[in-house]
Each structure stands twice: as C-alpha cells, then as structure tokens.
Amino acid sequence: MVTVLKPGVTEEQIENLCRWFRSRGLDVHVSKGKYQTIIGLIGDTKQIDTELLESLDIVEAVKRISEPFKNANRKFHPDDTIVEIGDVRIGGGNFAIIAGPCSVESPEQIIEVARKVKEAGASILRGGAFKPRTSPYDFQGLKADGIEYLLEAKKITGMPIITEIMNANHLPLFEQVDIIQVGARNMQNFDLLKELGHTRKPILLKRGLANNLKELLMSAEYIMAGGNENVILCERGIRTFETYTRNTLDISAVPVIHKQSIFPICVDVSHPAGVRDLVPSLAYAAVASGCDSLMIEVHPDPTKALSDGPQQLTPAQFTELVGQLREIAAVFGKKIV
C-alpha cells in the first residue's frame, strides 16, 4: 500500500503518520520527490481502513499494490534511482559505458585495456576475477590476484571498477571494488543477496539465464530489503530455442523495467551476441530502447583470451563502436562522455 501526501505537509505531520503506521506493525518507507511525498507500507495492510486514511487532511490518495516487489516498485517511488560511483552516475538520464575483458588475465592485460577503453569513452572498467564456468576444467579466474590487478588498473587510470562476486565469504576482498556484480547464475542466490543488502556498495544484478522480469525484480527486492538501494539491473540475454546467438537479448526488458521499477538498467550486449560482429547491432538497439548503461567486453587480443574470446571486441573495434553510439545516444537526449 502507498499513501500519497498532499503538497506542503510538514515533517512533524509525516512523522506522526509514520508512527501510527508502525504502531500497527507495518514497515514504513518514506520517499520524498520534487513535488510529492509517498509513504510505502510493507506488511499486512488489510487492517488499514483506506477510507479513514483518505479522510485525513494531509492525505491525497491511498493505493493498494498487488505486485510482490514493494521497495523496487515505481508506485512506491516517484523518482528514478540514480546510482553514483565517484563522478560517474547511472540512471535518471545519466549514461555510462562499462567495458573491459571477460577475465582479468595479467596486470599488463587489464592495464592496457583500461587505458584504451577509457580513452575511447568508457566510464567504468570491468573484468572477471572469479569466473563461474560451465565446465570445471575451464579457466576459473585469478580470484584475489585478479582483484588486485583491477585495483592497480584503477589506481593508474582513475576508473571505477566492477567485478563479479561468487560467495558472500569473499566480501572482504571487495572492500575497494566500486560496484559488485551478481552474475546470472547467482541471481537467486538469496543468502548472497541478503548479505549484499547490508553493504552500501552499488550492486549490478544480472538477470538469470531462464528467469522472468518479475523474478529479477524480486531478487533486487532482497537487496533493498537489507537497506541497500544502490541497485542496477542488467539484461544479458536469456536462453531460448534460438541457437544462432549465444543467448537471446530481451530488448523489451528495458522499457518494462523502467515502467515497473525505479532501477537503472544496464544491457550486456556481449553475452547475448556470443560473436563480436553482432555486438554493435545489439548495442545500437539497447541505446535506442532507453537503457542507462552498456556493458561491452574488450580484449587486446581476443584470439588469445582465456575465456569468451569470440564475443570480445578489440580496442580499435570498441573505439569505432563508441563513436557510433555517441550519435545514436544524442538522438535520444543522452550523452556519452
């Protein structure tokens, strides 16, 4: 249930009403927009007499919400979430490109990529240190060393970094990581999501390989329920009967997420493509659909990559793509720095 308050309501009036809600065992979430204040109620709201509530002088409207995701619901929050990572902002009209190799392979490799993607226009450096792979015999990442190499690249270039976490026990290793990524295979690892809810770091939550958008939003709800509202959702393609591409990019997820929730949404265009020549077309479509961020894999020599080489762009290809994306973004009122 949400209670929309009239303009000009005082802080004391808001607190008195919140105290009354809490006395009835409800959790209260106050969202103050530019023109309206909304009080979201979580719990058994059947006991609340909506007609009585609407009769109060300070109340403009009362709405019951049927969707199970509450904190993330657009009806709870009038404004978009803007996630800030240093000087970089994602959401609310702000756009950022996340780029880097699938896996961190050496200090030289990640530093070289960082310099080149930053020069081309990327704002955030990505790189996998812990790699969940289908086969136990494939490269699993450099783990703690990989994070150290990312931090070295961050120190040299000044770029914020994002990398994937596999286990809540690894959280101490992520203290200096700017954005923690939850991969598709861990989208419904609820114990991990609960732990991330107790942090205040931005979390990029990838959609699972076979999960619908409601399930993605419910996973985000786990993080928000712990008090962390710095959530970025990521569409990275879903598994369908199509075999030409690695996954099927659900481009409709972008407007649906924007309509239903407050989250900024990033589109990973490398994993649905599976091959680098499809990456530009998917990136064009993602920007045109209204996404707030792109994630693109870049490697200095994809033929020698230890993971996902066929889908990674070379630095020269990435530079050319960013130039094209700048023109497309401008049409839709967005700017790539």
Image (cartoon, rainbow, N blue to C red):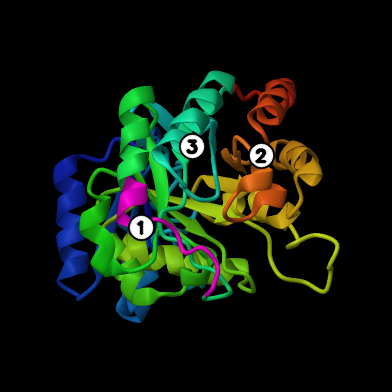
Q: Quadrant of the N terminus?
A: bottom left
Magenta highlight on residue 139: yes
User: What is the CA distance from the residue labelled 3 to the residue labelled 2?
Assistant: 32 Å
**Residue type at mark 1?**
Lys
Q: Which mark is residue 109?
A: 3
Left or right of 320? Residue 120 is left
Q: Quadrant of residue 317?
A: top right
Q: Residues within 10 Å of mark 2 (few under 14, many from 20)?
A: many
Looking at the image, residue 241 lies above or below residue 91: below
What's drawn in magenta, residue-wise?
A: 137-147
**Which of 1 and 205 lies nearest the eye of the viewer?**
205
Q: Quadrant of residue 194?
A: bottom left
Which circle's residue, 3 or 2, is located before the other in the chain?
3
Residue 314, position as x, y percentages in the image = 67, 34
**Which of 257 and 285 lies nearest the eye of the viewer?**
285
User: What is the CA distance from the residue labelled 1 to the residue labelled 2?
Assistant: 34 Å
Q: Which mark is residue 143?
A: 1
